[in-house]
Amino acid sequence: MISRERRDRIKSVLIRYPALFRVVRATYITYASLQREVFTLFRFAPRLIKSGLGSSRDRETWQRDLPVQRPMSVDAGSVTPTLNPQQIKAWCSARKLPFFEGGDAIYLPPQTWRATPLGPVLPGYPANAGLKIAQQAGNADAPYVMARAGRAVAQKLTFPHRLQTLTFNYMHLQGVAPRLYDLIEIRDGSKVVWTAYVVEHVETSPLQQGDCESMVEKLRSLERSGPLKLISGAGWSGMDFEPPNCNNNLIRDAASGRALYVDVHNFILEGYDAHLRGLAETVTEQSHFGGRSRLLGGKRGSFLYQEIPGLDRPAKRSPRMRLQAWDPLLERAGVSIEGKAVFDIGCNLGLMGAEYLRRGARWMHGWDQPDVAAAAHQVLLSIGCTRFSLTGGALRPETDLAAGLPEHLRTIGNDGAILSYLAIRGHVGWLPGLDKLPWRYMLYEGHQEDADLDTYVAELNARMPVRLITTDRVSDGVSAPRDIALIERQPRA
């Protein structure tokens, strides 16, 4: 591989001879393309042959690999002896705090759950987050539906809480359900684990005539055309789909005017691999970056920049392998991603962010171009991530990065956050706005043809005091080796 400095020197000579420059440039492009295809064939041939680009293996992998995000775990033993539903009801009733009870869960609006002893021990979430606590004890792998007479079909088919996040997110993306912010395992003082859903609380307005019928038709249409499958034993004629309010499962969002169906647990997903493959096709152009490949991208040559979990489909970068390369560096420095907010500059499809959430990150916020951020929103929800937010916009020296942070992240101190600056410096430089974000450690990744790492660390040091802790050189996907480094922010003198 020719270094960037040497390439620039050769270019400065050839530029004096336009005809020769064009010949050399065309030859180099052809050589680089051939080199990329050979490298791709060498690295991915067994996988391409075995999977046929994934359709058969995808059916086997999505339920095993998804959701990517690890549920948040909280020990609430110091503030509550038990989360028994009857005690929750009694506690709220005694203080005249509103709550709603269903057959399988108790829902606490934002002002209610923040007033309970749980308020101080749960992580920070958006201000409009409500808490839906399952009435049946169990962790994220336990079923949502409680065992009782007349529910044999649902009890047999229902997803555990963990997979229900995929159903929740899918229905939200289709515009028929609120946003899910998190899945939490809460351990009470009796060492019993309860699972709760942190969900978007919707201020409601009165339902309109025909809302229930319209919603049922939307849901039936989604079942006919996609992966959504109804598991209610009574089917579409059951009370959960009867006018005027679908058994209190239908609400109208006063802000948007949309009708929303809140009992997503009536449904599971089947054939979700086909949905993921379709999603991959729609986001390939937005995510593609760098050279093209006929082997991976067909006639257009464009292919995914980041591998999508749940799909056995190669991409330029493998986020899972990429983060595994960081493990020795983080271990040597005694740094953990768990419980931290991670700020990902140039996040692409957000899939490095998904890996941070797999490691227990408290929240991930990413920045990228508007169309890329929109694609990342779809992808992250589709693979079961919920603790994230995104800012779409150009990354320029004048960009105010801190202005894009959600309110619940603005009080985080430097020790509570990590900055992810991977393969982005060469495109945008060291953004001045980095100084305004809270972070102590930076995960830095350079580019394939970079100069010495110390050069770029010195450039950053000219903007803000930092020190280089540890480094390595790694490669993943069809990417050539590049420098990675763990950088620590220093106090200003």
Image (cartoon, rainbow, N blue to C red):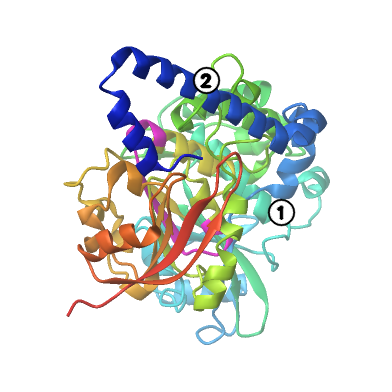
Which of these two is toward me, 78 or 136?
A: 78
Q: Which residues are magenta?
A: 356-372
Numbered disc 2: secondary structure: helix
- Residue 415 spot, x, y in % from top left: 36, 75
Residue that lies at the very extreme toward the bottom in this rendered image: 78
Q: Using the rendered view, name the quadrant where residue 143 is placed.
A: bottom right
Q: Reply yes or no: does residue 365 show up in magenta.
A: yes
Which of these two is toward me, 148 or 181?
A: 181
Horizontally, is 306 left or right of 205 in the view? right
Residue of label 1: 160
Residue 216 visible in the displayed image:
no
Q: Amino acid at mark 1?
A: Pro
Residue of label 2: 30
Horizontally, is 413 left or right of 237 in the view? left
- Residue 141 spot, x, y in % from top left: 72, 60
Which of these two is toward me, 354 or 99?
A: 354
Residue 187 visible in the displayed image:
yes
Q: Using the rendered view, name the quadrant where residue 146 is placed.
A: bottom right
Horizontally, is 414 left or right of 477 in the view? left
Distance from label 1 to label 2 (Cα)?
Answer: 51 Å
Q: Dot 2: few (<14), some (14–19), or many (≥20) neighbours within 10 Å?
A: few
Which disc, if any, is residue 44? none
